Amino acid sequence: MQLVKQILRLAIPSIATFSSMTFTGLLILMIIGKLGAEAIAVVGITNIIIYNLWALFSGVQGAINYLVAQNYGSHNMRQGNQRTQIALLITAVQGVVLIAGSFFLPYAILLVMGSNDTILDLGTPYLQVRMLALVFTMFNTVFFAYLRAVGDTKTPMTLSLINSGLVVCLTYVLAYGEFGFPELGLQGAAWSIVIAEAATTLMCLIAHFRYQNETFQTRSWVPIERSQVRLVLFESMKLGAMEVSNSMGMLVFTACITHLGTTAIAANEIALNVLSFGFMPSNGFGAAATIGIGQEIGKGHTSEARRFGLVTVYLGLIFMALISVVFLLFATPLAKLYTTDEAVYTTAVSLIHLTAVVQLCTGANIIFGGGLRGVGDTTFLSKTALMSNWLFFIPCSVILTQVFDFGQTGAWTALCMAITLTAAINTLRYLKLDWSKLKAKSGKSKTAAAAAMHM
């Protein structure tokens, strides 16, 4: 029972964090909707671009999440702080690249995606500002990863909720010129994200360098070691490759459906939005698995680490089973919340039913994947993502939609099969690991050696 409470203490705030992000996106879309169909299209396309850009740079926060969790478990937070310093420096370099790219890439990216003149005119300045916001977002994810690694999931949850409230309020105020503010339209919506993310970064700085300093001496500079730079870079690249593979798979999946007409596109967007709500418990328990297993590995308690992951999976699958039942029973009412077009919601219902069938596989895939990340099995995760997306998901999506003409049902069948395949692979990998030989990654660091001598 104590273990269950520990897992839920880590998972529930993470679920709330992911939920706030999903609801924020939905509310922003509803607010922006009054600006016209072109504005909705720009936001939709930009979200896809920003997601892929985030995936490209996301490996840093994923690496810090499990590496610092292992440091926390081994009581070597001096090394954890060093790794976080390295991550922040890497993120700063990435930020400079993004800022530079924001001045000349947005138009070219939108043009390559086949945008018309209206989308190019509205979307270019909007994407430019969103890329600036992404710089702050990347810093926030690193700070969140550190906080979760040391077991503090409530602070990221609180900051995410504040961020969500700021984004929604500022979007309404700046887009429509309320309360004496200028009416900036779509650009107002973009700048609201910049302001909210910058404010969140400021709060993260306060949390990290003031409140965390009391326990972990985060204000003390730890000399950078090349071995640790190599470790953080290498782990970041592997996890980044995994996220890019997943994002590219979804990009091709979306492109396959885009060619099927307006009804298919609309039904797909509805089903994806519903599916995103289904992902929230899995993501929360997956984060808990990474943190808990990483900390136990750091302590050298490998058998406890394995048990932590299995119990987390059991709890997560209970939540996913409940969601599966909801999707099966209430697919039609859920779809009708988005549209009154019978052709669209009828098609969406069939897709929601497909996702309901694989909810348990979705849970196993994400949570076991989080567990493997906690032990540092990142090479396996990146290879699995590369192969499952490029050798299975992407080819199947193209074949089922373009060759056999199964429409969006074919694309979603490919998605569900890919989820099931990856779930089976991650499950087998987790169960067949030789846990007695697992240990925290040291990167052959002098810091680690010095700490070990003083223990």
Image: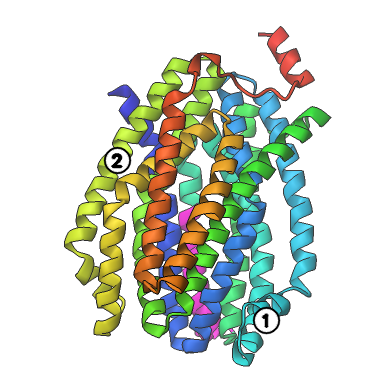
> Dot 1 corresponds to which residue?
111
Relative to residue 170, is residue 137 depicted above or below? Answer: above
Q: Is residue 63 left or right of residue 285?
A: right
- Callout in the foreground (1, 2): 1
Q: Quadrant of the N terminus?
A: top left
Is residue 19 covered in magenta? no
How far from the left and from the top, in percent, is residue 438?
Answer: 55, 19
Residue 428 appears at what percent x and percent y? 42, 31
Segment colored magenta: 160-181
Which secondary structure lies at badge 1?
helix
Say which element carries label 2: helix
- Which residue, given by chain and number where applicable, does mark 2 sit on? 317
Q: Quadrant of the C terminus?
A: top right
Return the residue found at the far left.
329
Looking at the rendered structure, the kind of residue marked 1 is Leu
Considering only vertical position in the picture, is 192 above or below 446?
A: below
The location of residue 328, given as percent across then percent down, is 20, 59
Q: Is residue 182 visible?
A: yes
Task: Determine if residue 225 is in view.
Answer: no
Q: From the viewer's side, name the closer residue of 188 and 41.
A: 41
Rendered residue at 40%/39% (across/down): 424
Q: Position of residue 254 (x, y in %)?
A: 49, 70
Tell me the residue at 58%/30% (across/down): 376
Q: Earlier in the sequence, mark 1 or mark 2?
A: 1
Task: Report the front residue among 84 and 50.
Answer: 50
Residues at marks 1 and 2, CA–CA distance in whole angstroms: 42 Å
Q: Which mark is residue 99?
A: none
| Vertical comparison of 221 with 253: above or below | above
